[in-house]
Amino acid sequence: MKLGEIIGKLIKKKGLTQKEVAHKIGKSTTALSQMINDVYEPNPETLDKICEVLDVPKPILHFMMISEEDIPEEKKEIYRILEPTIKEFIFSVFGSNQTEILK
């Protein structure tokens, strides 16, 4: 899953609008929309602000971007075993049902 798609789903999951998030991160709604649509990736400072507004640590965003296609063939079996448990654990720590974001 691409970063923009994850950000868009998190915004919806948190019950926020793109306009609200854009204002809170100091960007235009158009700029945020372009990030969500993967026209371009946010710079590190903007990504930090997005994470703060969405109350999600940056490593969680990066982890959600990992897919089986990113894993070397010789390690895919262990990935298939660990991935659901790790994601479930991470999201349980944050106290919300964010696993739906990955669907």
Image: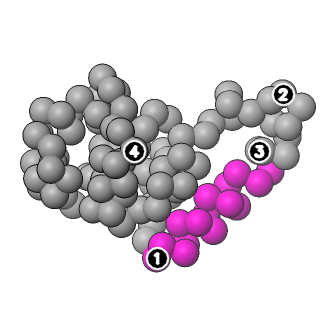
Q: Residues within 10 Å of mark 3 (few under 14, many from 20)?
A: few
Image marks 4 and 1: residues in contact by CB distance under 8 Å:
no
Of labels 3 and 2, the one closer to you:
2
| Amino acid type, label 1 | Gly
Instruction: Give the residue at x 70% y 61%.
Output: 85
Image marks 1 and 3: residues in contact by CB distance under 8 Å:
no
Q: Quadrant of residue 70?
A: top right
Would you say residue 4 sits in the magenta stretch? no
| Amino acid type, label 3 | Arg
First in sequence: mark 1 vs mark 3: 3
Identify which residue, 58 or 12, lies in the foreground.
Answer: 58
Residue at which label 4 appears: 44
Residue at which label 2 appears: 73
Distance between the Cα atoms at labels 4 and 3? Answer: 30 Å
Residue at which label 1 appears: 95
Distance between the Cα atoms at labels 2 and 1? Answer: 33 Å
In the image, 70: left or right of 51?
Answer: right
| Amino acid type, label 2 | Glu
Q: Residue furthest top?
A: 39
Residue at which label 3 appears: 80
First in sequence: mark 3 vs mark 2: 2
Q: Which contiguous range is marked in magenta?
A: 81-95
Q: Is residue 99 above or below residue 38?
A: below
